[in-house]
Image (spheres, rainbow, N blue to C red):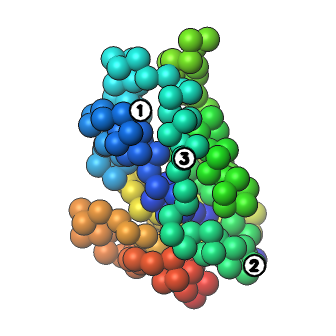
Amino acid sequence: MMICCLDLEGVLVPEVWINVARKTGIKDLLLTTRDIPDYNVLMRYRLKILKKHGLRLPDIQRVIARMRPLPGAKTFLNRLRARTQVIILSDTFYEFADPLMRQIGYPTLFCNRLKVAKSGLITGYKLRQSNGKEKAVRGLRKLGFEVRAAGDSYNDLTMLKSANRGILFNPPAAIRRKYKRFPVTRTHAALLKQLLK
């Protein structure tokens, strides 16, 4: 029995925070888990930037509502789901994800929650659990699944290491150089082939 675990942003959809940065002109929001390995450090930084600029959840949701999946992602996901079960393991938030999930057919998603004031200002976040991607993969393996996993960022590495087979999808050069044990794919067709290999 095989199951595939995929990261969301950078694999199936564009990076939410990069799109927010581009739409608002706030360059400080361009940093992602491709740049900063520690997710909590990154999120605390983002929250400070949001507060400084008065950017609220509805402002971010308006940007997300205009986003589309990466080219070929929906076809890739449909083909993968026809062959095996798929779970999206993401560090995004349910408050962000719905418009994107709708466009890719609502696959199963494990992610986190935001803490939001009545004003709409994001005041914090609640992780589903610490190091949730790795723990989900380990849990699935304990249930008897062979787990294949794909991601692109530092926060995906424990998931890839814990899987029976881990694959990088368009990773930054620093990750590609340091983690040569993982095959690197550049297209969804190549990723599909590696996951089903």
The residue lying at 56 percent from left, 18 percent from top is 120
For marks 3 and 1 on the same chain, the one whose residue lies earlier in the sequence: 1
Look at the numbered disc 3 and give the secondary structure of its residue: loop
In the rendered structure, which disc, 1 or 2, sits on the residue that comes first in sequence? Answer: 1
Front one among 146 and 190:
190
Crowding near the residue tagged with mark 1, few <14, some 14–19, many ≥20 C-alpha atoms within 10 Å: some
Q: On the image, numbered disc 1 is attached to which residue?
A: 43
Horizontal placement of 171 versus 59: left or right? left
Q: Which mark is residue 82?
A: 2
Q: Quadrant of the N terminus?
A: bottom right
- The Cα atoms of the two marked residues, 3 and 2, are separated by 28 Å
Instruction: State the residue position of label 3.
Output: 66
> Contact, CB < 8 Å: mark 3 with mark 2?
no
Tell me what residue is drawn at x 46 percent, y 45 percent. Answer: 16
Q: Nearer the viewer, mark 3 or mark 1?
A: 3
- Could you classify mark 2 by the number of other residues whose Cα lies within 10 Å: few (under 14), some (14-19), or many (20 or more)? few
Q: Specify the quadrant of the image occupied by residue 136.
A: bottom right
Evaluate whether residue 171 shows in this view: yes
In whole angstroms, how far apart are the C-alphas of marks 3 and 1? 23 Å
Residue 191 on image: x %, y %? 51, 78
